[in-house]
Image (cartoon, rainbow, N blue to C red):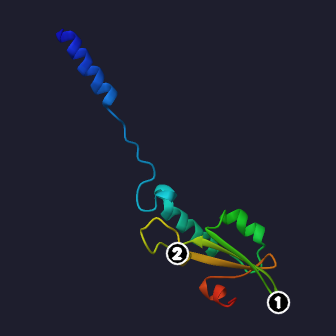
Amino acid sequence: MKTLLLSAALASSVLLSGCVVSVGGGSDSHYGADWEDREFNNRQHIAKLEKGTAYESVLSKMGVADFNELFEKQDGTYRVLFYRTQKTKGDGITTKDECTPLVFRNGSLVGWGDSAYGLMH
């Protein structure tokens, strides 16, 4: 009887034990542990940009933007890509104020940063 009780107790402890797996962690868990690397890489790429660079070229180097906009004005079609470059809040949500805008007119880079974005509005 002791053997049966001991076996049951041992089996139940094995069956009831669990494993906790934490993926990502931190306040910016949707970026994993390397959100700082991502921001740094975005800043590095932006620092090397040249006016007139084609939209496709920038997109292939930078990857998918955090936000994007497309609109028409009298002087052309504008596309704005927003890439995260700095963290303002540790809430795990990327907002436009944490991003640097890249402004394209008719597929060509015409400027970047808040001042370039502000000139369009």
Amino acid type for the residue under numbered disc 1: Gln
Q: In this image, 102 relative to 105: left or right?
A: left
Q: In the rendered structure, which amino acid carries the disc numbered 2?
A: Glu
**Would you identify the image quadrant in which residue 53 lies?**
bottom right
Screen quadrant of the N terminus: top left
Q: Nearer the viewer, residue 56 or 95?
A: 95
Residue tagged 1: 74
Front disc: 2 or 1: 1
Residue at 45% x, 75% y is 88
CA separation in Å, label 2 and label 1: 29 Å
Front residue (pair 11, 97): 11
Tag count: 2
Q: Position of residue 20 (x, y in %)?
A: 37, 41
Q: Label 2, on which residue?
A: 98
Please tell me which residue is depicted at 67% across the width and 72% down the height of the picture.
Answer: 68
Work out whether mark 2 precedes mark 1 in sequence or the reverse, and give the earlier one. 1
Task: Give SS at disc 2.
Answer: helix
Locate the C terminus and report the quarter of the image it occupies: bottom right
Compared across the picture, whether 3 is left or right of 52 comes to left
Q: Position of residue 34 (x, y in %)?
A: 49, 58
Question: Callout 1 environment at 10 Å: few (<14), some (14 to 19), or many (20+)?
Answer: few
Residue 78 left/right relative to 4: right
Residue 120 lies, with reference to residue 62, above or below; the image says below
